[in-house]
Image (cartoon, rainbow, N blue to C red):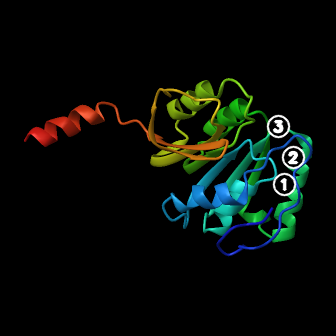
Amino acid sequence: MRIVAGQLGGRRLASPPAGVRPTSDRVREALFARLEPLEGARVLDLFCGTGALGIEALSRGAARVVFVDRARRSIQVLRENLASLGVEEHIDIVRADARSALRRLAEAAERFDLVLADPPYEAGGIVELLEELAASELLEPDAVVVVERSKRHSLGPVEGLELLDERGYGDTVIDRYGLHAAGGSEEAQADDQC
């Protein structure tokens, strides 16, 4: 596993612990190619595992990344990766389940431009987690939420978020969401009629 592009491009990452499914280099490359430039962005990496997605964001110019995972072994590998790359000053690590982490970050008045979520493919409650994220004050108005999932597990509608696009890469699907603007489509229709 390696960093695909940016300042740290080509550098190797430590292997994930058993039971962790890392995002492939090919999928990471495709995911980041569809995002706006990340210069100065504040990023939240949920279910971070080894940190490959958040580290890729740092490599591409993100100012800060908050990594969240509940597994002790994943956090240990993440720390090894960050130390070997020398990027510890640009990060925070929260060892907690995603819901608890969202609450703690909201209490700390954190705000994010990009959220990367790579939950275990069999995990339940992802739609509810995304709805909690959308209802929180954690997202900047133009924030993007990216979710990696199996093509066998469709998420369906997520209250508060609008699906911008969905792309498949083998068994993996990447869904990209933005905050749903209340009444946005009706306003757009009214503007079109003028």
Outermost residue, front side? 170
Structural distance between the alpha carbons of marks 2 and 3: 8 Å
Which quadrant would the N terminus be assigned to in this image? bottom right
Where residue 65 sits: x, y (%)? 67, 55
Q: Residues within 10 Å of mark 2 (few under 14, many from 20)?
A: many
Q: Which residue is mark 1?
A: 78
Residue occupying image coordinates x 47% and y 26%: 159
Q: Which residue is mark 3?
A: 70
Secondary structure of residue under mark 1: helix
Residue occupying image coordinates x 55% and y 41%: 138
Residue occupying image coordinates x 71% and y 73%: 9
Secondary structure of residue under mark 2: helix
Q: Quadrant of residue 184?
A: top left
Give, as a three-letter code, the residue at label 1.
Leu
Structural distance between the alpha carbons of marks 2 and 1: 6 Å
Q: Earlier in the sequence, mark 3 or mark 1?
A: 3
